[in-house]
Image (cartoon, rainbow, N blue to C red):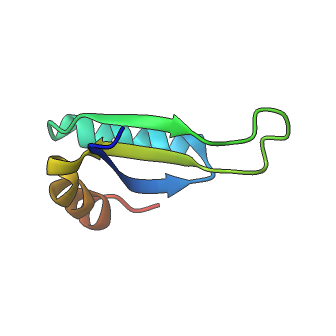
């Protein structure tokens, strides 16, 4: 995943899914990486990753078009 870049991180899976959905609506390929502890589910976060070349546009969308 060296050509992927993290553009969003949350402890809430729903927020990560919303970000992924908005990015995909804008033609940006996004994947969710679950880094939560599988046993306790209170440690770790959910990350949204995009291809490095799409990261600047994706960050702009996350910062300016999505609010929680």
Seen from the viewer's position, the closer of residues 65 and 2 is: 2
Seen from the viewer's position, the closer of residues 13 and 45 is: 45
Q: Residue at x 21, y 63 (%)?
A: 60
Q: Residue furthest bottom?
A: 64
**Which quadrant of the rendered structure holds the N terminus?**
top left
Q: Residue at x 18, y 60 (%)?
A: 56
Percent position of residue 39, x then y: 84, 34
Question: How many numbered circles does the render carry?
Answer: 0
Percent position of residue 43, x then y: 76, 51
5 lies left or right of 33: left
Seen from the viewer's position, the closer of residues 17 and 42 is: 42
Percent position of residue 40, x then y: 85, 40
Q: Which quarter of the picture shows residue 13?
A: top right
| Residue 24, placed above or below residue 45 | above
52 lies left or right of 4: left
4 lies left or right of 39: left
50 lies left or right of 12: left
Q: Residue furthest front?
A: 2
| Residue 55, placed above or below residue 64 | above
Q: Residue at x 75, y 40 (%)?
A: 37
Q: Residue at x 16, y 48 (%)?
A: 54
Seen from the viewer's position, the closer of residues 5 and 65 is: 5
């Amino acid at each position: 995943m060296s050509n992927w870049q993290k553009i969003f991180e949350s402890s809430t899976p729903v927020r990560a899914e919303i970000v992924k959905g908005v990015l995909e609506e804008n033609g940006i390929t996004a994947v969710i990486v679950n880094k939560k502890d599988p046993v306790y589910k209170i440690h770790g976060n959910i990350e949204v990753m995009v291809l490095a070349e799409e990261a600047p546009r994706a960050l702009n969308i996350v910062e300016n078009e999505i609010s929680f």
